[in-house]
Amino acid sequence: MQSIFKPKFFTILKGGYSRQTIVNDLLAGVIVGIVAIPLAIAFAVASGVSPEKGLVTAIVAGFLISFLGGSRVQIGGPTGAFIVVVAGIVGSYGVEGLAISTMMAGVILILFGLLRLGAVLKFIPRPLTVGFTSGIALVIFTTQVKDALGLHPEHLPAGFLPKWGVYLTSLNQVNPAAVIITITTILITIYGGRLLKRIPGSFLAILIITPIVALFHLPVHTIESVFGEIQGSISFQIPHLDWSNLQNYIQPALTIAMLGAIESLLSAVVADGMIGGHHRSNTELIAQGIANLASPLFSGIPATGAIARTATNVKNGGRTPLAGMIHAVTLLLIMLFFGKWAKLIPMPVLAGILMVVAYNMSEWRSFRSVLKGSKYDVLVLLTVFFLTVLVDLTVAIEVGIVLSALLFMQRMGKLSSVEPMEQDTDVIENYSALPRGVDVYEISGPFFFAAAQEYRDALRNIHYKSNVLILRMRHVPFIDSTGIHNFIELLKEMEKRGIRVILSGVKQEVRKELGLYGIDEMVGEEYICETFANALKQAGLHIAFTEMPHVRQVMK
């Protein structure tokens, strides 16, 4: 097996662990394990399965994703993005159908990795991911309104609009105790973690509210009243496969695989940015596949990389896969010794936790940011968002990918009628004559979703010896919101390295997009130059200024 498929854990293990690294990973793993408890239970309940299935998923899949994965700090388990998908599969095919679909998705993910399709993330435009993530968030919020208000309608339809229709006609049934518990949970979840840094707000809400509800016998539903006893053990069971119905599980399996691949690689990319690392995308996909193959064998549900828990791991000092494995072991011990008490958790508490999750998932700032961009990005964003909410996530992703491709082709077709690109008449093409301390790189072609990550990675991996980087963009006809997002991340990274970025030859349409997202202010108006000669002039002025004795002293 080539090194590209080698898990990060084995690479790090070969290099050796220091005592401090083990201590940091141990602490981070325990904290993330505590964070995962309420989320794993809440995701399972919202998906229409029993609570212990969420815990089992976080334990089994979480351990395998860290042990075999291609990221140093990825935390795996059930996530909010899967709630809509899992609930739909359970409603149509039952728990057995979910198990088969999840295992088929695992095989697909392994094939993705073996076929070296780990770069699939860069072909997913940002408006599409923001659109379906925001749509899922709204759907999750909607599913929790019933428990948040303590409603008990005779029949709750699956559709988004019909569901709200039932809510509105059932307002006379609102349970004040459930509403107060939900609001209190939301406040504790948001602010509790800020007061007690090491205890997650959601876990704190469960610890405070559950005993109060049990002690005063408040009239609200609990996990026990809805699901019965919680199994405090893990058992191995092979799902029964009816080969005659195998074709029914292909589409659900593809949906799980695609969503799992997108979310896990997105989480790994975010983690890379936090620790300055570089994950192995194909290895990560193979690990995700193995985890989803194993999870149903222990009565688990689909799993993927969890961005919020991964970020919590990094912020608490986790730096190797050991932290993720400790997180899984922590969950296992809690489930075995304290799992029986989880049945007392009130449903409004889980509703409040999931409403906070939905808000954090909504990416409303990113949503608003994309709305400020080109009409092409806005069209993809709104189409995927409304299809996710009103129709189906699978349809939304399929339509979004096709629509993005068609709009890109239309955009490129329009460029063919534009005049030939002007050539700089005062350009120094002999880069060997560049001033000392200046690097020049050129971006050619559209800075769009399929190339944005590649451009960013290429520029990130260069070992700069200079403190000025001139980016020539004379052959960039347009930039989309994915390109903008990656460009902003690149600028932040260059700023951390102390490298001044100067843009040269930016076309009017691209300059307009940069202005809409505030990139002109990040770079500085004076450092966005029409010609390469002006860019060299600005580079010379910057180098001369930074080499002044008093400026160098301040920079130190």
Image (spheres, rainbow, N blue to C red):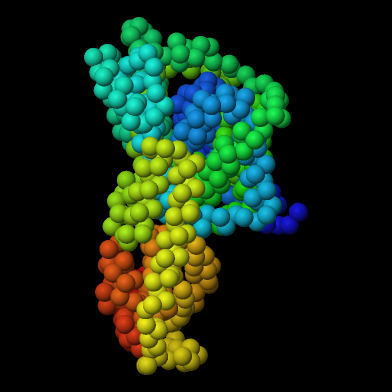
Residue 166: image location, x then y, percent: 31, 21
Is residue 497 in sight in this rendering? no
Looking at the image, residue 316 lies above or below residue 531: above
* Residue lying at 48% horizontally and 92% vertically, measured from the top left: 430
Residue 146: image location, x then y, percent: 34, 21
Looking at the image, residue 465 lies above or below residue 159: below
* Residue lying at 68% horizontally and 48% vertically, measured from the top left: 111
* Residue lying at 71% horizontally and 30% vertically, measured from the top left: 243
The front one of 16 and 314 is 314
Location of the N terminus by quadrant is bottom right
Left or right: 517, with 435 as reference point: left
Residue 426: image location, x then y, percent: 37, 93
Left or right: 326, with 141 as reference point: right
Residue 332: image location, x then y, percent: 59, 26
Looking at the image, residue 513 lies above or below residue 75: below
The quadrant where residue 469 appears: bottom left
The front one of 239 and 537 is 239
Residue at the outermost right position: 1
Location of the C terminus by quadrant is bottom left
